[in-house]
Image: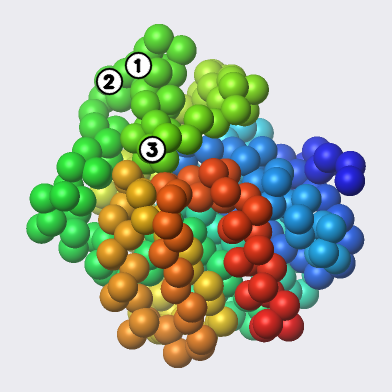
Amino acid sequence: MPEPMRDAVQLHGMEIEILTQGEGPLVVCLHGFPDQPRTWTPLMSKLAANGFRAVAPALRGYTPAAKAPDGNYREWATASDALELISALGYEHAAIIGHDWGAAAAYTAAALAPERIKHLVTLAVPYGPAFGRAMLFDGDQQRRSWYWFFLQLPFAEAAVAHEDFAFIARLWREWSPGFELPAAQMQELKQRLAVPGVLPEILAYYRQALGAGPAPPGEIAARLKQPITVPTLYLHGRNDGCIGADLGAAMAPFFTGSLQRRVIDGVGHFLHAEQPDLIGAEILAFLRAQA
């Protein structure tokens, strides 16, 4: 099957780079940090081979042309981008798959516009207050989340970029123990982060999340307090070195639609990159069952 094609769409005053593959019902794949659309390629190929159109955008801030005009990198901004992407591609609704920050955007898109999201698949980041509480009160999660606090520091950009982004390679090793991202993909990720002006925008996701960012408007804030009604599949790697797999156990009260939760043995944080066949099979089975 041909490789995904590169394209770009205009969203909210930004030029958003996308990868696209296949024809059929739309599935939007949202990456996280430190990552990029290319990591979705194996899953996109599986989706395309099974009758879906898979599209993986670069999140706002991940290219110079995608610098947020309003400076907003909160989850409702990236969710709004995902919803606008669905319309820009000519669809009324889509399935959405999100990993890490992409998962936060996917949850928010489903909360803000459940009629636009047919199926929700999230990886590695649970929904609800459990993660935030663990960062405050759980020593194990505090040790995993050290980078959140480090990235608030004024010299973080220089530290992250030092020695050819050794910081980024370290996060991948710690978060997905025993897995090595293919060298070409790691180099592409480093090149993306090295583009002047990109890294400060990406770190703004963390800086705004800890209090420096805009608060949600009233209508959005109200919707985010409501449970998610969209059928949802949540996958978390047992060996995740970034977020404890047990934190997903408290998600159920925040869903009134169906929620399936799986903890996958033998994988870590970047589970879709580590075991694309296994993760792809889980996702395809969910999409087919919910069709």
Q: Which quarter of the rendered picture does the C terminus lie within?
A: bottom right
First in sequence: mark 3 or mark 2?
2
| Relative image position of residue 237 (x, y in whole percent) | 42, 55
Residue 187: give its label: none
> Is residue 63 depicted above or below 262 in this figure?
above
Q: Classify residue 279 by image quadrant.
A: bottom right
The circle drawn on residue 155 is 2
Looking at the rendered structure, the secondary structure element under dot 3 is loop
Query: What secondary structure is marked by label 2?
Result: loop
* Amino acid identity at mark 1: Ala
How far apart in space, not on screen, are marks 2 and 1 (Cα)? 6 Å
Badge 2 vs badge 1, beta-carbon distance below 8 Å = yes
Residue 158's label in the rendered image is 1
Identify which residue is drawn at 83% across, 50% down: 21
Q: Name the residue under label 3.
A: 177
Q: Gap in Å between the C-alphas at discs 3 and 1? A: 25 Å
The residue depicted at 42 percent of the width and 84 percent of the height is: 255
Residue 242 visible to an observer of this rendering: yes
